[in-house]
């Protein structure tokens, strides 16, 4: 049985485990018991050994290691650090209080404080020195000006509130930027998990230049993982089937008909054929190359991948890619030396060319993926071409980089959306969801026989 | 297995396997708790090596199960030697009056032992290395989980076989997919990151002693620099660093420069796109700059 002193310790450990759980780590009783048992083999006084023992028993995923480290450093501190922390917190509270009093004094109008919420007061106290002074000066000047004019108090309150809101959002942005820069400088350690989450959720078109390498790496990783999963699934769906009598008999002829070697049936599912048509016009270039990179990584899991790019005309990229130029180099070259690149986007002309010159690539096994923000010249001409394409291929998907809330603004989105399946893909998370979850969903995965329409 | 922490640390050093204190402690706990050790990390950071080294340290046999897609129980656990059984029947049939009992056909001599069964039936404690467990199918993973929970196997014809000595199990994973929670729950977890410059220098010195300290550090710095390039598809592994070091020894080189690195890039970046990326974004100049920064 556990002695009382140990009981207290076990209780603390349980508390720590629940803290881990609250932060998303799957820590169960089994892990906790392992941890307690592990501690019996080490010198508990050795902080590093203590940490390692908990880490190797409680954390089972490298993505969770950072969270663990952070929580551990929070929870298990030497006593002197603990008292110091308490003091520091107390000091900060006092400082905050003093600043708030000062703020109430500064933001007053004729001796009476302005009607501001506590949050707004807090924002004021955290403003940079210069901004706080200028706002303070503004309040005083308004106070002085009132002699000549009608009551200014409500107006002043509105202005001050507006200013504070503005500064609040600006500071929030700046600190997010700092965090990102910090993560970059830290060589991927630090807040890597946090950064990845941010990249996944960020609008691809809005990503800053400094985020691009990390975003590309993320895309590559996701696409590799998906390819591995797809290949595995194929394997799993092609299990050792029933005994194949015909092949067994045949293989055993030389053994005098004794069933010496057994042959089994194997199912071999057909792979998808993908046809990628990406808008590489100036505004869409980055987005399309992101999507293309994702899909290109899946090459091993599909039987055929054809790549087209267009702006105002169509360009067939597959042959160039087979001459083993890297994907990125190729895209650069296309954008630089394309036939008549940089002009307006003309989806209709591009699709017409596809329907006319590359008909042999459009089969009932093909899934066509168009990547474009739907903005094009001559929308009316594009619609019948898109319909024609849809009739020829198995499935027609449109990945749209516009955030869904903007869709109603464009007539073209609705018009194209009636013909093709249009999926929102403005973030990496959505892109992954669309391709992994929807495009390669089990039902779509062609099973053996050719698909009849 | 009675081994103390200090002793374990010493033996790791003796065989020239350089790991950090965390790893040693985790291995120690895995031995004490008699639990499997799951090692995750990028390819080429020495995960598989850990299994081999452990066998060497503990002076015991290493049984290796390499996982791959489609690996099933007949390849991992046991299989009846169907052909041999059939032959036996044929032989018996030719002889007058011979009678074969069913038990005769399902005895140990007709059993093909695969790695897992071999580890369980071994008379002493062995090291069982289950390599690249993320490559196997989830069904197999579930089965593995079962075996690792009880260390016993039921063979319908023979009954239940229980491990006499619970093997030291090391599982490795390249993170190609997440493993099931159940399997992870059974294991102690260790994550291997690429080593820092200091440790990689030590590793180079331990494995390729002809390389001098200063030169080894230069190599380690270049490799660490390449690994920081997030866009690389495949970052150079420790094995590749070592190959490179050996090649440099053969060439009789004593110091690095950008020209040399660019010329031997094939040993570090084994992917055309990564090489193009190197030439586009780093180039000889980048390496020269890096080497200068460190001061000689």
Image (cartoon, grey):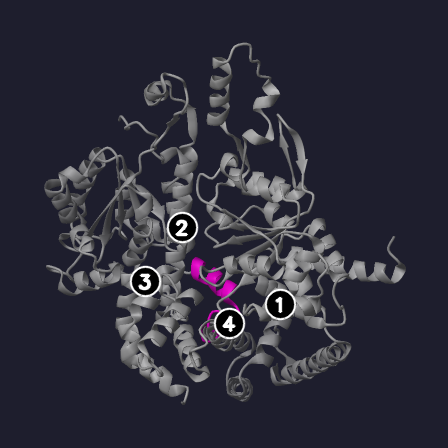
How far apart are the alpha carbons under marks 4 and 1?
A: 52 Å
Residue for badge 4: A172
Residue for badge 1: B11
View extreme (front): residue? B96
Residue for badge 3: B270
How far apart are the alpha carbons under marks 4 and 2?
A: 28 Å
Q: Check disc 3 and report its element: helix, strand or loop.
A: loop
- Name the main secondary structure of what is drawn in magenta: helix
The reply to the same-chain question for discs 4 and 1 is no
Given the image, what chain letter belongs to the residue carrying mark 4?
Answer: A
Residue for badge 2: A432
Q: From the viewer's perspective, is residue A61 above or below residue B280?
A: above
Mark in front: 2 vs 3: 3
Read off the magenta span: A184-201
Mark in front: 3 vs 4: 3
Neighbor class of circle 1 (other Cα within 10 Å; few <14, some 14-19, many 20+) is some
Q: From the viewer's perspective, is residue A46 above or below residue A32?
A: below
The residue under the point 48% across, 21% down is B86
Mark in front: 2 vs 1: 1
Mark before the other along the chain sequence, 4 or 2? 4
Instruction: From the viewer's side, name the closer residue of A145 and B209.
Output: B209
Residue A372 part of the magenta segment: no
Q: Check disc 2 and report its element: helix, strand or loop.
A: helix
Point out residue B85 in the picture as x, y percentages from the top left corner. Answer: 51, 24
The residue under the point 34% across, 32% down is A268
Point out residue A63 in the picture as x, y percentages from the top left corner. Answer: 54, 59
The residue under the point 52% across, 32% down is B79
Mark in front: 3 vs 1: 1
Mark in front: 4 vs 2: 2
Residue A196 part of the magenta segment: yes
Point out residue A427 in the picture as x, y percentages from the top left corner. Answer: 39, 56
């Amino acid at each position: 049985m556990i002695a009382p002193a140990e009981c207290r310790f076990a209780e603390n450990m349980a508390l720590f485990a629940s803290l881990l759980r609250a932060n998303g780590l799957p820590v169960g009783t089994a892990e906790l018991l392992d941890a307690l048992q592990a501690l019996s083999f080490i010198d508990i006084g050795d902080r590093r050994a203590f940490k390692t023992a908990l880490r190797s028993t409680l954390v089972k995923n490298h993505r969770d290691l950072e969270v663990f480290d952070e929580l551990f450093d929070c929870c298990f501190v030497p006593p002197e650090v603990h008292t110091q922390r308490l003091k520091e917190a107390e000091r900060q509270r006092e400082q905050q209080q003093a600043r708030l009093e000062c703020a109430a004094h500064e933001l007053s109008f004729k001796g009476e404080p302005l009607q501001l919420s506590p949050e707004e007061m807090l924002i004021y106290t955290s403003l940079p020195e210069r901004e706080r002074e200028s706002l303070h000066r503004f309040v005083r000047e308004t106070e002085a000006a009132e002699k000549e004019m009608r009551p200014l108090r409500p107006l002043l309150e509105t202005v001050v509130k507006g200013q504070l809101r503005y500064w609040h959002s600006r500071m929030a942005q700046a600190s997010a930027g700092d965090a990102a820069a910090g993560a970059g400088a830290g060589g991927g350690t630090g807040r890597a998990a946090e950064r990845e989450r941010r990249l996944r959720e960020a609008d691809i078109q809005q990503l800053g230049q400094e985020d691009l390498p990390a975003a590309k790496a993320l895309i590559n990783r996701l696409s590799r993982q998906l390819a591995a999963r797809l290949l595995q699934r194929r394997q799993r769906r092609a299990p050792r089937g029933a005994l194949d009598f015909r092949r067994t008999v045949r293989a055993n002829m030389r053994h005098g008909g004794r069933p010496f070697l057994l042959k089994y049936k194997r199912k071999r599912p057909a792979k998808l054929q993908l046809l990628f048509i990406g808008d590489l016009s100036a505004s869409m270039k980055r987005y399309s190359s992101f999507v293309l990179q994702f899909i290109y990584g899946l090459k091993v899991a599909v039987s055929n991948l054809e790549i087209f790019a267009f702006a105002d005309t169509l360009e067939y990229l597959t042959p160039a890619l087979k001459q083993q130029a890297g994907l990125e180099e190729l895209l650069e070259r296309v954008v630089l030396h394309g036939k008549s690149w940089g002009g307006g986007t003309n989806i209709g002309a591009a699709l017409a060319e596809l329907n006319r010159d590359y008909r042999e690539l459009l089969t009932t096994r093909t899934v066509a993926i168009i990547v474009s923000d739907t903005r094009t010249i001559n929308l009316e001409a594009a619609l019948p071409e898109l319909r024609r394409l849809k009739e020829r291929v198995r499935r027609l998907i449109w990945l749209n980089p516009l955030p869904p809330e903007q869709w109603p603004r464009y007539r073209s989105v609705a018009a194209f959306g009636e013909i093709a399946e249009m999926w929102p893909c403005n973030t990496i998370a959505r892109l992954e969801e669309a391709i992994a979850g929807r495009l390669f969903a089990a039902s779509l995965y062609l099973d053996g026989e050719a698909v009849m329409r | 297995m009675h081994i103390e922490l200090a002793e374990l640390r010493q033996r790791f050093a003796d065989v020239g396997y350089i790991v950090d204190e965390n790893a040693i402690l985790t291995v120690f706990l895995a031995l004490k708790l008699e639990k499997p050790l799951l090692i995750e990390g990028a390819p080429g950071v020495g995960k598989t090596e850990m299994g081999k080294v452990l066998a060497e340290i503990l002076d015991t046999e290493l049984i290796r199960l390499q996982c791959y897609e489609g690996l099933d129980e007949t390849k991992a656990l046991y299989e009846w030697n169907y052909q041999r059984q059939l032959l036996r029947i044929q032989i018996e049939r030719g002889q007058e009056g011979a009678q074969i009992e069913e038990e005769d056909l399902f005895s140990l001599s007709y059993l093909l032992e695969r790695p897992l069964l071999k580890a369980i039936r071994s008379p002493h404690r062995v090291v069982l290395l289950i390599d690249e467990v993320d490559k196997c199918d989830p069904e197999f993973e579930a089965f593995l989980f079962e075996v690792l929970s009880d260390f016993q196997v039921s063979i319908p014809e023979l009954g239940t076989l229980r491990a006499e000595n619970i093997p030291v199990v090391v599982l490795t994973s390249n993170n190609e997919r997440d493993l099931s929670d159940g399997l992870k729950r059974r294991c102690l977890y260790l994550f291997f990151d690429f080593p820092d410059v200091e440790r990689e220098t030590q590793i180079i010195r331990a494995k390729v002693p002809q390389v001098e300290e200063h030169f080894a550090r230069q190599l380690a710095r270049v490799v660490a620099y390449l690994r920081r390039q997030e866009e690389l598809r495949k970052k150079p592994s420790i094995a590749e660093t070592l190959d490179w070091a050996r090649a440099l020894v053969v060439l009789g080189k004593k110091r690095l420069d950008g020209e040399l690195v660019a010329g031997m890039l094939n040993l570090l970046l084994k992917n055309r796109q990564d090489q193009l990326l190197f030439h586009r974004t780093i180039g000889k100049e980048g390496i020269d700059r890096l080497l200068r920064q460190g001061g000689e």
